[in-house]
Image (tube, rainbow, N blue to C red):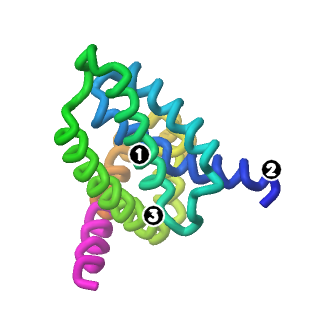
Amino acid sequence: MSDSSKTNEFLRLLMTSQRRIYAFILTMVPNHGDAEDLFQETVLLMWSRFDSFTPGTSFTAWGCAIARYQILSVRKRHSTRGILFSQAAVELLQSESERFIEQTDVRMQALRHCLDKLGAKDYELIRLRYRDEVAIQSIAQQMGHSVQAIYKRLVRIHDALLRCVGKSLREEELA
């Protein structure tokens, strides 16, 4: 793999996983500033070890494992400050975080599937509101509808997506 394609692949994987890795760190380190520092250190370490990542496995889980070791390393360095949890608490939080991340991945996959089922106009409304973060008033003007009508349509779409995701998750459990 060329350096350029390696960099692109790493960045692509990181962009899809960074929020979950940061959330994992934040569950282990309650201070946002410390969590941000740990996240940056973790990303640098992930990049330096990217050759050891096995394609096809969970990049998020790999990143969380690296983050865990970073957190343990910081705990050892700062043990006199007493800022972090005991080893048993760290292990419990990690196992719960891993389960949460797996559940989140399954839910996100179900949501993507359900979004694909939306009609073009509904999908466009969701895209404008949540991906592009366009204000409701602007969407209403752009689509030629009242603000109230946009809110009502969003509620109907949310309800449909919630039902669809729930159904997908139930079907996955039965499979």
Q: Mark 2, residues whose alpha carbon is within 10 Å: few (<14), some, or many (≥20)?
A: few
Q: Mark 3 sits on what residue?
A: 112
In terms of sequence position, does the residue under pointer 3 or pointer 2 come before the other?
Answer: 2
Image x and y of residue 81, in percent:
27, 14
Residue 20: mark in rendering: 1
Q: Mark 2 sits on what residue?
A: 4
67 to 35, vertically: above or below = below
In terms of sequence position, does the residue under pointer 1 or pointer 3 come before the other?
Answer: 1
Image x and y of residue 109, in percent:
42, 65
Tag 3 and tag 2, C-beta contact below 8 Å: no
Image x and y of residue 18, in percent:
49, 43
Give the residue drawn at x 59%, y 65%.
55
Mark 1 residue element: helix
Give the quarter of the figure containing the C terminus.
bottom left
Give the extent of the magenta segment: 161-175
Residue 167 part of the magenta-drawn span: yes
Tell me which amino acid carries mark 2.
Ser
